[in-house]
Amino acid sequence: MAKRLVIVGGGAAGMSAASAARRVDPDLDVVVLEAGSHAAYGLCGLPYFLANVVPEIDSLRAYPPEYFREARGIDLRFEADVLRLDPARQEVHFQSGDGLDVLTYDKLVLACGATPALPPVPGIDDDHVFTIRRVDESSRLRALLDAGHVGRATVVGAGYIGLEIAEALSSRGVEVTVVEALPRVMSNLDDVIAERVEAEVRRHVEVRLGTRLRALTRQETGIDVDLDGSTPVVADVVVIATGVRPGSALGATAGAATGPHGALMVDASMRTSIPNVYAAGDCVNVNHIVTGRPTFVPLGPAANKTGRVAGTVAAGGAAYFPGVVGTAVVKVFELSVGRTGLTLDEALAEGFDAHATDAVGRSRAKYYPRSAAVHVRLVHTVDGHLLGGQMVGTGDDVAKRIDVLAVSLHAGLGVSDLADLDLSYAPPFAPVYEPVQLAAFAARPSVRSAS
């Protein structure tokens, strides 16, 4: 009788795990239980679907369900809501259209994703309040936009998703107000970079910082958005983008160990503390390569990679995930913003004797069309140990460069190594003195003076 692998969750991590397991063991019975009605969608593309940059929602789908079922032999089941695990009996209890059901497993992968962290305020359950975490919800908001029913919107939260949504709605002609409880946008950046982002956002939409959402009240004219310390606004729709929580409850209730933010603890092969149970994606903590400690970084690349490792190992193969450095890049209207490793604030909080060095270079040769400023901040110790970096520029000028810093962190390169890298140069793509290396040159004198 074939062994059975059950995977809970049909998102990026879950379907990566299923596909990896199938490659390792063609005879394995692979069952994916997905509580919703969609699988393998690129949720990071939802803001661009709302903006009509991506016209069709199915363009965000990696593969249709039939492909997984027929070409890969994966038993993908929708509307299968897992209620509890029984690790002693190796059983999964779930609700489906046929009622309550039970599946036994030889190995289990939890890929339950993350859930929106909703503020506990009245009116949050209004049907014109959105979180942009699900395909069906985003499709409903897109229909309202297409029908011309959205003239005013309030976005609560000024992180990655909040600012992407603000841009998407603004591009559709919507009057947008961004509300953020903290005193700056993108709190995962240092002040000097965040201030540049804030200035760009204010060019396009209204921004209210240090302002908390107090209540949402449905009126004939729309939704009254009651704000603490600020005048109320009226919106046709409200988007809540105040972060996410790991979907770890299923595993934690069954006895799996948890760590920072309540996410499931896993080893490098994605094993939880429960025998024969693995976990991957936005419900787990992974190793932070800079600090050497577990961290919760719910981003798409790590979800896919940890899912692949979990599925490979659960099916009998060998794989491991070394960790993350927290690399991310985001488009904010005309700006692109990137970060990797630790910010100065984070590095100091971790106990490093950290310093920051800023430099401004050009994206291309100064005489070449579309050459623009790129602001780079390096975070490092006085002896040249690289801890992280941030940058802000225009167009596609940042993504290539933040990856240079990410590779340097993975490789353990220091500031002097970064300054000496042989990076590409041609006037249409980069100047002779790369912005990241200008920052490294500026940081090196402090390194030398300390030696």
Image (tube, rainbow, N blue to C red):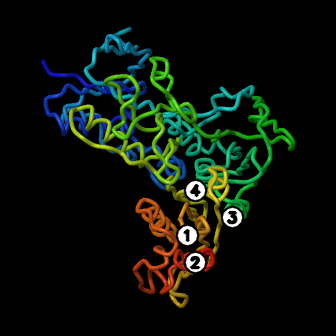
Q: Which residue is mark 2?
A: 444
3 horizontally vs 185: left or right: left
Q: Residue at x 65, y 40 (%)?
A: 242
Q: Nearer the viewer, residue 103 or 306?
A: 306
Q: Amino acid at mark 2?
A: Arg
Q: Nearer the viewer, residue 25 or 136?
A: 25
Percent of width and height locating residue 434 = 50, 80
* First-in-chain label (3 vs 1): 3
Q: CA distance from mark 4 to mark 1?
A: 15 Å
Q: Amino acid at mark 1?
A: Gly
Q: Residue extending furthest bottom?
A: 367
Q: Residue extending furthest front?
A: 451
Q: Residue at x 54, y 52 (%)?
A: 51
Which of the labelled discs sits on residue 384, or is there none? Answer: 1
Q: Which residue is mark 3?
A: 200
Q: CA distance from mark 3 to mark 1?
A: 32 Å
Q: CA distance from mark 2 to mark 1?
A: 7 Å
The answer to whether mark 2 and mark 1 are in CB contact below 8 A is yes
Q: Looking at the figure, which quarter contains the N terminus?
A: top left
